[in-house]
Amino acid sequence: VAQKPDLIACDAGSTDPGPYYLGSGIPFTNATAVKRDMTLMLKAARELDIPLVIGTCGGAGANPHLMREVGILKEIAAENNLSFKLAVITSEFEKEYLAVVHGTPEAEATLRDLLGRDKARKMTYVAAQPAKGVQEAVLHYQTLASSDTLTKVRIQLETGRTHQIRVHMSYLGYPLVGDPLYGNRKNNYDFPGQALHAYALGFVHPRTGEELYFEAPLPEHFTSVLKQLGDM
């Protein structure tokens, strides 16, 4: 502070606490210690009229961790009569996908499984019980249209595990069209790769608080396979 810096910044995630804290929403940092350190930094930043940047809040940086730190920050401001502009940037985004799967799943469902990763085979698998390296995975899906043998579904992810959608749907018995790794049916639709498209992304603007939502148009090969199926 004596050297008059242009910025005060700290990273609360330099120590990786593992997947439990991220998935459970429980911060691994002590709230009393966080408040003590944050008070020192915030008062110094306001005294010098410079920004204070705190990254990976709560150790893991998920929304529950972030909001606890925001609450502590507001407590400090009230107790010390400090005023400032606060920008909150979340690391969690709303992601939606479109997929075409074999079979006819239920109209909508939430899938919640434990996923592990076989590094030797470079595959993700559904685990029977918790273990080292196994993480909870959650997604929601809704069916949009179907033919005799295929269904178009919309999928929202709560977690972002490697190959999560492909593994979830295959384990449920409805593998993605064209999935050479987790599918068990021949690809008869001339589709390059699996029929999965990240089509929408939503997040809250960190400065204005506006809810933003963006859609990506379907690629040509995805549209063409839908036409082959009767434009579902």
Image (cartoon, helix red, strand yellow):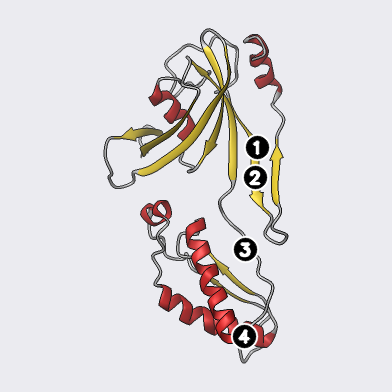
Badges 2 and 3: C-beta atoms under 8 Å apart?
A: no
Give the residue at mark 3.
Answer: 88
Marks 4 and 3 sit apart, C-alpha to C-alpha, by 20 Å
Where residue 81 is drawn, which disc sits there?
4
Marks 2 and 3 sit apart, C-alpha to C-alpha, by 15 Å
Mark 4 residue element: loop
The percent position of residue 21, horizontal first and vertical second, equals 39, 57
Q: Amino acid at mark 1?
A: Ala
Mark 3 residue element: loop
* Quarter of the figure with residue 25: bottom left
Q: Amino acid at mark 4?
A: Asn
> Which sits in the foreground, 115 or 93?
93
Give the residue at mark 1.
Answer: 200
Q: Amino acid at mark 2?
A: Gly
Mark closest to the chain's N terminus, 4 or 2 = 4
Give the residue at mark 2.
Answer: 202
> Which sits in the foreground, 188 or 79?
79
In the rendered image of this protein, does residue 74 appear above or below residue 117?
below
Mark 2 residue element: strand
Confirm whether residue 8 shows in the render: yes
